[in-house]
Image (cartoon, grey):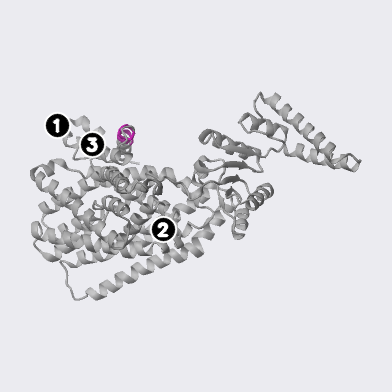
Amino acid sequence: MSDAFLKDAFVYLLAAGILVPLFHRARIGAVVGFIAAGALIGPHGLGRLADSLPFVRFITISSPERAAPFGELGVVFLLFLLGLEFSAPRLWKLRREVFGVGALQVLFCGVPLALGLALVAVPEPEVALVLGFALALSSTALVSQLLIDQHRSLAPLGQLVIAVLLFQDLMVVPILLAAELLSGPATDVLTLAAMALAKATGAVALILVAGRFVLAPLVAVAASTRSRELIMAITLVVVVGSAAVTHAAGLSSALGAFLAGMALSETAYRHQIEVDLEPFKGLLVGVFFVTVGMSLDFAAVLPRALWVVAGVAALIAVKAACTYGAARLLRVSAPAAAEAALLLSQTGEFAFVVLGLLAAKGVLGAQDAATLVAVVSLSLAATPVLARVAARLGRTLDARLHDALAPVASTASGHVIIGGFGRVGRTIADALDEEGVPYVAVDADPRRVAQARTAGRPVFFGDAGRAEILDRLGAERALAFVATLDAPNAAERMVAAVRQHWPGTAVIARAKDAEHARRLAALGVAGVIPEAAEASLQLMAQLLSSLGLADEAVAARTEQTRARIRDDIERRTGAEGI
């Protein structure tokens, strides 16, 4: 590992560790903090002082391209996790948004942007057309992260925005193909287009088919080993492999990761996978936003500052207006259309690729390319602010929108969460079914989970002792928690997690013996009766009945003995209210 790499890693972590909490505390958002950190430590920030102040080299990053691959990997993880939230049936329900609103958005934005470029900066109509459609695409990484941070990716607005972003990802191939053909022969256009379409279709089909018949069984086999390391390794192979397949086909790597996540979304393992990948995603996506900040070159912008500011304003205004029109044309509500329009009003990082390609081919001047890079960069930097404006605008247009976009970790609400789905867990689930009380269960045994899901039960694979898993199951809106886990330490971890994060929600736990009951009572579980003691009470009741005692007397004696056991547990733990 080189000294330069270690130095860059240190500078990145230091800057992010200082600025991100400050921006978060100011309620501006972590994304803006990462972008600001990149602008500060990049070659166009403090890096400009390196020649006159040599020590500055130790607190800046001079080669952003070294960090770029890690940032791209973060975007891949981000889209994979987003795909886990979107099953194939759910995506099919969004086909009008994907191929309707998405197609109209690209068309409505691409044409006027191309006309504007042709009139102002790019006289060649074919170059202006390619650039117009490249600028019409938005930032999948940035917008998706904002939606996830606000827990809105599954809300109606989030689904609309993600549907449009998915169609935009599909447009990468034709736009790149058109850019490649600008300075080359046009004789083989149809052949090249057919080959590109075939490769893209084949890549998507391969991931979807492999996801159903290979990836899901592979993860199931890994889960059967009870090894989190193996599950993590298999998941990483799936994510990176799917991204590589679509990238090789000319599509975005993020699209491949999304499709892989969608293929695993209907399995029982998605919550465990989400929790395991979350730390990697957060760190690497941060690297991506830092690289965006590094691309901001304010010194280069100053000579043409008015043009750049006017360009950013025009870009945002045109894209917002055209996106709003496309959404309204397909009967999206005015509040949702307005908020989606502002969220998608920036230009995505794909534009950097197209601008670099056109400049390298000599069909776009260096000065024009630099100006457009500045416009794109500033539009990205403005997006978090636009997102906040969008939320306020949406609530102003329709006060009911606030309820529709309430943060959710899952679709479950007013339910019971059962930890463990063995004999006791199934008995409780049966009782809840009979009473009409909704529930969701989590179990670490993949075979048990598979059997339950085959029977149509809402059971997921995961560690019930991890707060992140419980949160994915809608813990914040749960009526109660029930710990029926076989292993005593597993039940205690679940109870401890519930008491720490959701102290106001009732928690019931199964105790193996008196010592286990004492530990659970110490954690705050009320009414604990050891499993062995309860069995002895039932035996005692049967014996007394067989000896001829009246049912009332048997019930009274049983309850008296149960109370004595409970008092003994309370006395030993020093707990109150048990």
The crowding category of the residue bearing disc 3, from other C-alpha atoms within 10 Å (few below 14, some 14 to 19, many at least 20), is many
Name the amino acid, label 1: Ser
The crowding category of the residue bearing disc 2, from other C-alpha atoms within 10 Å (few below 14, some 14 to 19, many at least 20), is some
Residue linked to disc 3: 40
In the foreground, 561 or 70: 561
Residue 19 on the magenta span:
yes
Marking on residue 525: none
Q: Residue at x 30, y 40 (%)?
A: 34
Q: Are marks 1 and 3 in contact (CB under 8 Å)?
A: no
Q: Residue at x 44, y 64 (%)?
A: 208
Say which label, 2 or 3, has the lower sequence index. 3
Name the amino acid, label 3: Leu
Residue linked to disc 2: 241
Dominant SS in magenta? helix
Give the distance between the C-alpha atoms of the residues marked 1 and 2, in whole angstroms: 45 Å
* Foreground disc of the pair 1, 3: 3
Count the marks.
3
Give the distance between the C-alpha atoms of the residues marked 2 and 3, in whole angstroms: 34 Å
Residue linked to disc 1: 52
